[in-house]
Amino acid sequence: MTRSAVPVLSLSLRKKIGLAAGRFRMIAPGDRIMIGLSGGKDSLVLALALAGLRRRSPVPFSLAACFVDITGGETEVSSLREFCDSLDIPFFVRPHPIVGIIEVREERSPCSLCANIRRGILNTAAKEDGCNLLALGHNLDDVVETALMNLFHTGRFRAFQPKFRQSRTGMTVIRPLVFAEERKIGKEARRLGLPVLPYVCPFSLETERVKAKSILDGLSAGNPRIKYNILHALQCLDERDKWSEGGEDEVSPPSGDEVQGEMTWEKTADSL
């Protein structure tokens, strides 16, 4: 893939990504963004989207990408390197034997451990490259599945934020794909012939997320809008909707009020 033949994302997907970046003020002038490039469809579309946004945006920012090789260095990454070169994105590889560690420890929650290790490696790589933002490829389905998992297992209706600052590391995480459906991202990756790597994780077929995805697919069959409705609910939980121990009368929200609440996704200022 040469720089003259860089693929262009569909307008509908670009709009959803631009909406998330703008609504949650993800990018500010002078930011340097490290993309967590897993080689999956989501992270490849994310890299392509940010490269396109970098060209068009009046807000100047720079990019880099890092691939965490969970096999410890056995993954062939030449296609990812070529892809990043075509987008003028510096590409880094950080090998770590995460799969082997999980197998030795017989970890009961392999996905959680893997995510934590990978996040730590990405944070370190981002800092070493002078980045202040870490961009991850979580999509709309990931948001909704996480909300369902938390609801079922912790009794709390919550999901990860589109943008948040990690107080321990000082790194800010952004998720520009939170308004984009997984199936549309997959369709776009196939249409553009993006170099998606084979999935190497041996633990991914028996996770709670797979179960949540199955439940969501079943619900979506009867209501195609259900993912968007759940996403809307995450942004609009109102304190007045909670059960009251005092038995107060129900209060209808005043007309025109912007609903706020515990799980409302916050907007921040002075950014894209």
Image: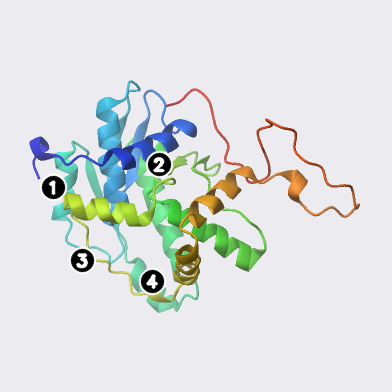
User: Mark 2 — residue?
Assistant: 176
Labels 1 and 2 touching (C-beta < 8 A): no
Looking at the rendered structure, the secondary structure element under dot 4 is helix
Q: Residue furthest top?
A: 58
Give the distance between the C-alpha atoms of the residues marked 4 and 1, in whole angstroms: 27 Å
Q: Nearer the viewer, residue 90 or 143?
A: 143
Which comes before the other along the chain, label 3 or label 1?
3
Which comes before the other along the chain, label 3 or label 4?
3
User: Mark 3 — residue?
Assistant: 74
User: Mark 4 — residue?
Assistant: 204
Q: Nearer the viewer, mark 3 or mark 2?
A: 2
Looking at the rendered structure, the secondary structure element under dot 3 is loop
- Residue 122: tell me if it is visible: yes
- Residue 24 x/y as whole percent: 49, 34
Q: Amino acid at mark 4?
A: Ser
Labels 3 and 2 touching (C-beta < 8 A): no
Point out the image quarter for the N terminus: top left
- Residue 194: tell me if it is visible: no
Give the residue displayed 60% in from the left and 49% down from the top.
233
Give the distance between the C-alpha atoms of the residues marked 3 and 4, in whole angstroms: 19 Å
Q: Vertically, is 113 above or below 267?
A: below
Q: Nearer the viewer, mark 3 or mark 1?
A: 1
Q: Vertically, is 147 above or below 248?
A: below
Q: Quadrant of residue 89?
A: top left
User: Mark 1 — residue?
Assistant: 82
Q: Quadrant of residue 210?
A: bottom left
Labels 4 and 1 touching (C-beta < 8 A): no
Give the distance between the C-alpha atoms of the residues marked 3 and 1, in whole angstroms: 18 Å
Give the residue displayed 65% in from the left and 64% down from the top.
154
